[in-house]
Image: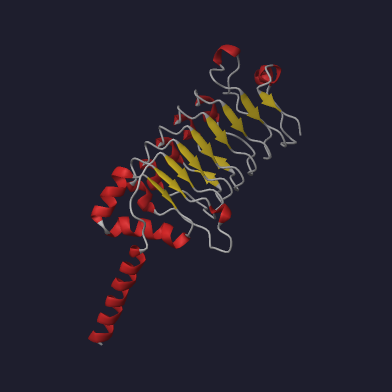
């Protein structure tokens, strides 16, 4: 019995080592075209302290766009070890099957670009409030029904793409995005826009475009009519 137990323990160790062995060498930019290698990277960070520290210090870009992964399984989760990458600035995870964001994403305080287009997300969780350096946030073509009120904390956000989701409303916190230049909420199920959006030219700051096309039941509050006059809001269906 003891030999059998030892066999399984030894096999598990060998499997873990082999799995981690597929992890890439650390560079400032890491590009993945295989799900297993992607997960091996995070697995090795979890088990190898030196590897983890090197990754935390050096990695600024992760590219894992599944668009050209013909015949391969897509990434379906972001491992919690993502939180180790405290110098990450660009995270590209479009065209995968990710359904939720791990809470550890809150540690990515230097992240500037986050692309999760064409995944299976149903919400934007509160943890995104800690992404204080985020400038571009793309979550188009998901299944998002809810955006956290804490989105207002992203004061450096310039480009926010929420098109082709299942949104019926937007949080009042959208009005707190003081650096926002472009907002795309086209092809949703919106019925109104938050009245916290800028109401006068003086408060527009950098805002140049709100794409609201293909929201057939959308009614613009009278307080925001000037945004149509200023050709900020686009409504053509």
Q: Tell me what residue is drawn at x 63 percent, y 35 percent.
A: 185
Q: Tell me what residue is drawn at x 34 percent, y 40 percent.
A: 87
Residue 180 in the image: state x and y as whole percent. 53, 26
Would residue 222 be found to the left or right of residue 79 on screen?
A: right
Residue 28 in the image: state x and y as whole percent. 36, 44
Picture quadrant where residue 85 is located: top left
Would residue 152 be found to the left or right of residue 5 on screen?
A: right
Above or below for 34 versus 110 = below
Picture quadrant where residue 191 is located: top right
Residue 54 in the image: state x and y as whole percent. 27, 48
> As drawn, which residue projects farthest toward the top?
202
Above or below for 63 versus 149 = below
Depth order, front residue of 7/21: 21
Question: Which part of the image, by quadrant, shows the C terminus?
Answer: top right
> As drawn, which residue projects farthest toward the bottom?
1
Question: Which part of the image, by quadrant, shows the N terminus?
Answer: bottom left
Would residue 222 be found to the left or right of residue 73 on screen?
A: right
Q: Tell me what residue is drawn at x 59 percent, y 49 percent.
A: 118
Above or below for 98 versus 160 = below
Question: How was this image coloured?
Answer: secondary structure
Residue 41 in the image: state x and y as whole percent. 37, 57
Q: Tell me what residue is drawn at x 71 percent, y 32 percent.
A: 218
Tag count: 0
Picture quadrant where residue 203 is located: top right
Depth order, front residue of 33/207: 33
């Amino acid at each position: 019995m003891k030999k059998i137990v030892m066999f399984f323990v030894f096999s598990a160790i060998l499997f873990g080592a082999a799995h981690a062995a597929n992890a890439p060498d650390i560079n400032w930019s890491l590009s993945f075209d295989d799900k297993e290698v992607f997960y091996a990277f995070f697995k090795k960070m979890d088990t190898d302290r030196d590897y983890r520290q090197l990754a935390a210090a050096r990695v600024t870009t992760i590219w894992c766009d599944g668009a050209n992964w013909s015949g391969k399984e897509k990434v379906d989760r972001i491992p919690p070890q993502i939180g180790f990458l405290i110098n990450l600035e660009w995270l590209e995870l479009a065209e995968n099957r990710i359904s939720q964001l791990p809470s550890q994403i809150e540690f990515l305080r230097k992240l500037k670009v986050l692309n999760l287009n064409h995944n299976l997300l149903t919400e934007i969780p509160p943890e995104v409030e800690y992404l204080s350096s985020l400038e571009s946030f793309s979550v188009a073509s998901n299944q998002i029904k809810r955006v956290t009120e804490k989105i207002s904390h992203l004061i450096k956000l310039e480009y926010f793409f929420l098109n082709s989701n299942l949104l019926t409303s937007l949080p009042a916190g959208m009005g707190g995005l003081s650096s926002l230049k472009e907002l795309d909420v086209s092809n949703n199920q919106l019925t109104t826009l938050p009245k916290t959006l800028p109401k006068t030219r003086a408060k527009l700051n950098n805002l140049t475009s709100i794409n609201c096309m293909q929201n057939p039941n959308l009614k613009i509050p009278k307080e925001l009519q000037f945004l149509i006059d200023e050709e900020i809001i686009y409504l053509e269906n």
